[in-house]
Amino acid sequence: MRGKVYRVHLTKDEKKRLEENVSQGVHPARQVRRAHILLLLNEEEGKPVTEQSEIAARYGCTTRVVYTVSRQ
């Protein structure tokens, strides 16, 4: 069963902050994983959105985690 897909649209500032979170400093693993998920789910013009199941496999979590992050 496939869950509802929530669309994620990040502003330039949000995207920049998430990219800094991923690449700099020491952050909790949960926070970094969520930042990666949001960056992959971000819908930009000309960029295909990655499937939830593919994201879950890439980061070693369930599709429910990806769904919850996109919903929040």
Image: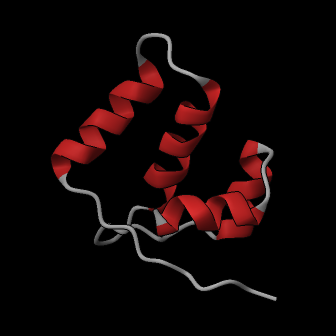
Q: Is residue 19 left or right of residue 2?
A: left
* Quadrant assignment, res 17: top left
Instruction: Residue at 68%, 58% (x, y): give it.
Output: 65
In the rendering, at what x and y percent does residue 16 appear? 25, 37
Q: Is residue 4 left or right of residue 15?
A: right
Q: Is residue 17 above or below residue 62?
A: above
Q: Is residue 50 above or below residue 58?
A: below
In the rendering, at what x and y percent does residue 43 appear? 37, 69
Instruction: Residue at 62%, 68% (x, y): give it.
Output: 67
In the rendering, at what x and y percent does residue 61 appear? 78, 50
Q: Is residue 23 above or below residue 72?
A: above
Instruction: Residue at 74%, 56% (x, y): give it.
Output: 56
Q: How is the image coloured?
A: secondary structure
* Quadrant assignment, res 13: top left
In the rendering, at what x and y percent does residue 47 appear? 39, 67
Q: Nearer the viewer, residue 47 or 19?
A: 19
Q: Nearer the viewer, residue 4 or 72?
A: 72
Instruction: Residue at 43%, 10% (x, y): give it.
Output: 25
Question: Residue at the top extreme?
Answer: 25
Please count the marks in the image.
Answer: 0
Q: Is residue 14 left or right of residue 53?
A: left
Q: Is residue 45 above or below residue 13?
A: below
Q: Nearer the viewer, residue 2 or 23?
A: 2
- Location of the N terminus by quadrant is bottom right
